[in-house]
Image: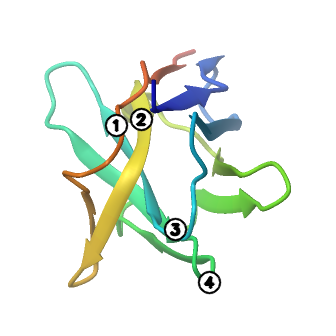
């Protein structure tokens, strides 16, 4: 089954870091846009940012820029989300998937392969 696989979540204290990984089961990430998205309890599904795998350009939601960094490991065909100075409001399930980029925002690509289970990030003291 073609599916994205997220990993690296966990529990962390406020101010701490986490690095999430995104890989693909059964296919290569290719040269598409790959986006990170998150779903927090009681909140809307939202984009975190995305990376253009054609040239490794990255784009972030304004409120997260400076704390979150997306990068690619070409050899491992993996995309990472480095999260620093985490805040309780960053608590969410994080997903990666193929995305689109338009007018400064990252969107889910409706033609993307299957989503993964996501990875839970919990930020609390």
Mark 1 vs mark 4, CA separation in Å: 24 Å
**Which residue is drawn at the image coordinates 45% and 32% (left, top)?**
2
**Which residue is drawn at the image coordinates 45% and 23% (left, top)?**
1
Above or below, 84 relative to 24: below
Tell me the crowding category of disc 3: few under 14, some 14 to 19, or many 20 or more residues within 10 angstroms, Cα based: many
Colouring: rainbow
Please, what secondary structure does the residue beneath circle 1 have?
strand
Please, what secondary structure does the residue beneath circle 2 have?
strand
Contact (CB < 8 A) between labels 1 and 2? yes
Say which residue label 3 marks: 51
Say which residue label 2 marks: 95
Mark 2 vs mark 4, CA separation in Å: 22 Å
Work out whether residue 109 can be spotted.
yes
Contact (CB < 8 A) between labels 3 and 1? no
Q: Earlier in the sequence, mark 1 or mark 4?
A: 1
Picture mark count: 4
Residue 55 bears which disc, if any? 4
Say which residue label 1 marks: 38
Residue 89 in the image: state x and y as whole percent: 37, 33
Camera-near label (1 vs 2) is 2
**Which residue is drawn at the image coordinates 30% and 52% (left, top)?**
47
Please, what secondary structure does the residue beneath circle 3 have?
strand
Q: Earlier in the sequence, mark 1 or mark 2?
A: 1
Left or right, 64 with reference to 66: left
Mark 3 vs mark 1, CA separation in Å: 16 Å
Contact (CB < 8 A) between labels 2 and 3? no
């Amino acid at each position: 089954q073609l599916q994205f696989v997220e990993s690296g979540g966990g529990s962390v204290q406020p101010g701490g870091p986490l690095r999430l990984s995104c890989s693909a089961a059964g296919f290569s990430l290719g040269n598409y846009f790959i986006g990170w998205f998150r779903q927090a309890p009681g909140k809307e599904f939202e984009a975190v940012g995305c990376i253009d795998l054609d040239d490794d350009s990255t784009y972030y939601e304004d409120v997260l820029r400076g704390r979150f960094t997306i990068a690619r490991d070409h050899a491992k065909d993996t995309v990472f989300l480095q999260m620093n100075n985490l805040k309780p409001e960053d608590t969410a399930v994080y997903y990666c998937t193929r995305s689109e980029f338009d007018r400064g925002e990252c969107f889910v690509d409706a033609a993307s392969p299957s989503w993964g289970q996501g990875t839970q990030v919990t930020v609390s003291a």
